[in-house]
Amino acid sequence: MKISTEMLKGVLEGIVLQIISGGETYGYEITKELNQHGFEDLVEGTVYTILMRLEKNKLVTVEKKKSSMGPARKFYSLNADGEATLATFWQNWEFLEKQMTQLKGDYHV
Amino acid sequence: MKISTEMLKGVLEGIVLQIISGGETYGYEITKELNQHGFEDLVEGTVYTILMRLEKNKLVTVEKKKSSMGPARKFYSLNADGEATLATFWQNWEFLEKQMTQLKGDYHV
DNA sequence: TTTGGTACTTAGTTTTACTATGTAGCAGTA
DNA sequence: TACTGCTACATAGTAAAACTAAGTACCAAA
C-alpha cells in the first residue's frame, strides 16, 4: 500500500521534523527510513526540498560531516522553534484525527 | 482549535464525499456542517470548487431543487464511482493514520 | 426599501509535493 | 584504467488542491 500524494500535503513536513527529533540525521537516510515506513514512492528530491524549507524557516540546525561511504552528509537537528513546531503539528494532527473519526461515524447511513 | 489548511489537502475531498454519502445534500449546508465539525475557517468557495471537481470526475449526481428559503439548491448524491472512491479514501486514511502513529512512537527520544 | 440570511460561481494566488535531471564522492572489480 | 553501483545533495519546472476575494441572485422581515 502506498499513500496518495495529495494526502501528504502539510503532513510530510511534520513527519520529517518527527524523524529529526529522534536524533541527528540527514536527507538520504530520512528518505530511506520513510521508504520503509509506507512512504514507498517518496524520493530524495522531495525530502531535500522539505529540509531546505525547514532550514529557511529556522526550525533546524545543520552540520556538515564527512563520511567514509560517499560525499559529505548534512546532519540536521531540531532547535527550540523546531520542537515547538513539531508539538503543534501533533496537536493539529490529533485534532484532525478526532474530527475524521467523528465524521466517519456521523455520516454513516 | 482549527485545522491547518495545508493538512487538509487531499483530505477535504474525502470528507465532502463522506458527508454526501450520509444523504443528499448541497454546498451551503455542507459548509455549515463542516464549520461545526472543527473546520471553522472553511468557506463556501472552497466547498463549491470541490463539488464541481466531484461532478467533473463523475463521482456524484446532481439535482436542482427549489427552496422556500432562498435561491434553488443543487443537491448532490454519490454514484457507484463515488462510493468506491470514498471507500478507497478511508483505506488510505487509515493506512496513513497507522504510519503516523508508528512514526510518532519510533522516533521518540 | 433595505438588511440579512440563504445559495451558487469563479478568477487569481499560494503552498506543497512531484518530475526529472544533474553533480559528485568513493569502493570494488574486471 | 574504466566502469558500475551505491551514497549523497541540489534544483528548475510542473501539477494539484485549497484559499482569497469578489460577484450574482433569491427571498423574508423590519
Image (spheres, coloured by chain):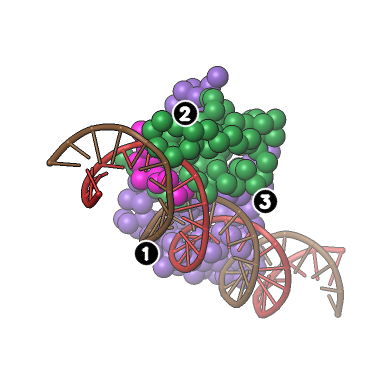
Chain colours: A green, B purple, C brown, D red
- Mark 1 vs mark 3, CA separation in Å: 28 Å
Q: Which chain carries label 1?
A: B
Residue at the image point whose x is 51% and y is 42% from the top: A12
Residue beneath disc 1: B58
Same-chain check, marks 1 and 3: yes
Label 1 vs 3, first from the N-terminus: 3
Residue B46 lies in what quarter of the image? Answer: bottom right
Residue at the image point whose x is 36% and y is 33% from the top: A36
Question: Tag 3: residue type?
Answer: Asp
User: Where A69 falls versus A10 (above or below)?
Assistant: above
Quadrant (top left/top right/bottom left/bottom right) for the N terminus of chain A: top left
Q: Is residue A42 magenta?
A: yes
Nearest to viewer (mark 1 / mark 2): 2
> Secondary structure beneath disc 3?
loop
Give residue A3's mark: none
Question: Tag 1: residue type?
Answer: Lys
User: Can I make out residue A88 in this image?
Assistant: no
Q: Percent from the top left, x then y, of residue D10?
A: 52, 51
Same-chain check, marks 3 and 2: yes
Residue beneath disc 3: B41
> Secondary structure beneath disc 2?
helix
Give residue B103's mark: 2
Nearest to viewer (mark 3 / mark 2): 2
Query: Dot 1 surroundings within 10 Å: few (below 14), some, or many (20 or more)?
Result: some
Q: Which chain carries label 2?
A: B
